[in-house]
Amino acid sequence: MEKPSIIKRILSFLLRIVVVLALMVLVAVGSFEGVTYYLTGSFYDIRKAGKNQTAKTAKDQTADTEVDAETLSKSMKNTLFFVESSDNLNRYSGLIMMNKDTGAVDVLLIPLHVQVTVGGKLLTEIQQRIPNAGSTLQLDDIARVYGEEKYRIIVDVFSQIFGVDIAGYDVMSQKQFEDLLDKGGSISYNFTDLLSYRDSSGKLNYFQAGEQRVDGPDAMILMTHLDGTAKQESDRLERSNTYLEAWLDKAVDSGKGSDLVGEVQTNASSSQGRDFTEEKEVWGKLRSDAVTVRILQGAENQGLFNIDSQKAKLQVSTLIKQSAEYDSSGEQDTVGTLDDDYETAASSKEYFIELYNAAFRQGLASEWQTYLEEEGYNISLIDNYQEEGPLSTTRIVVSQEGMGQDLLKYFPGADIETGEIETGGDIQVYIGTDSTSVGTSDQSYESYDSEEDTESEEEDTESSTESETDEEEENDKEDEDKESGNSGGTNYYNFATDSE
């Protein structure tokens, strides 16, 4: 057989090379497309599906919340209450939420110097007065620019933030509010530390640490005093929360609720068309177990509070639902009153308990650890909890249903819920601002009815606290150095660390 010519052989070789290269290209392209589809197409589809599902779930939850809030809000009457300082700018304010059907009342304390985010028609209206205003602005700026109209705008701002209708507002001067507090009666307040302040004449005064009798003027000092520290507003809010809970409990239990509403109606400057009829009816029948005082959650940065609208709406929505569930015919006020109930509950001393500081008291979890360990409990972990801001109500999470009931002896207002605990403990206690008085079930205050008891307690306090003040301040300083990670001040309510 005649051999192929050299040209044919070269062409045949080149053809084979071309075929091989073509196959390699086809394989490479196919592989690339397959890998690309796998890496981008498949994973993208999964992400997209997950994102869509998450968005759908969030949308459904939001819709459910809005439906629930819309249904429940028909029973609510919400008003804003302002106490004006002498400079007419610093407002000590709160949202009063009243359920007309169940007779429950919630007071939500609003921090000073608040920064909020608004939008829509409200922002357009504000920009007519403040042309350079963005969606995020300070209420103090609104107060300065709007003058007498400021309350109308502030009502609209908080209506948008909270997602509820606000029926109106009431404004009292500090002196008028002092008189109102006096009519509610004086109480015993536990000062955890010595509190110094200057009166209107500039004279330096102070409250000794320990139980002190507090009337209207003293209460205003508690609720307005700012000491210039990084956590001054947090301390003010905590004091206000503790005092107002005690004051309201005593006032409504003594049957003065309707009279106090009458005082507000007579002395306050209120929004046009404000009708107090429903308030007088509800407050006239109000019981102490139907009243709660809470602090609006927010992030503090150098004295300025930023309100997260989503968290604020959730907080308000939760309070609305709780007030709708209140049963005035039930035994609502029995928790924390009978020691026998705690003795019959299963003991938590055989379990590992974790303590989390969810208030803004420095070293609070450490103090509770010392106390509970002396009571025989096993504390396996202490730390901070900052994810939701300060909790007004202590939360107890248990790994099994029925656990933790005996802890209500120490945290009488706590909510108990069952959940998964991944940190190794059996019970988690998130200590709220209602449990800042360590080792007492009455949360550091009680009604002050006896003048003799008052005087004897004051004499005991003066004789004991004077010698202990220096030692306590030195111990507090040591505790701060040991426990605090707050050298520069964290931005979230200036929580001090409790972790070791």
Image (cartoon, rainbow, N blue to C red):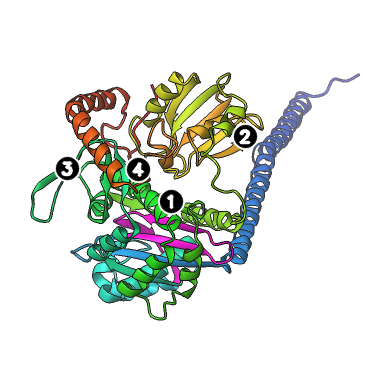
Residue 482 picture location, percent across and down: 29, 22
- Marks 1/2: CA–CA distance: 24 Å
Say which residue appears at 48% left-offset and 52% top-offset. Answer: 311
Kindly state the secondary structure of the residue where label 4 is placed: loop
Q: Which residue is mark 2?
A: 419
Tell me which amino acid carries mark 4: Tyr
Q: Nearer the viewer, residue 475 or 155?
A: 475
Q: Which residue is mark 4?
A: 493
Q: Is residue 101 magenta?
A: yes
Q: Which residue is mark 3?
A: 206
Mark 3 near mark 4, Cβ–Cβ under 8 Å? no
- Read off the magenta span: 92-120
Kindly state the secondary structure of the residue where label 2 is placed: loop
Residue 398 picture location, percent across and down: 60, 31
Q: Which residue is mark 1?
A: 294
Say which of marks 1 and 3 sits in front. 3
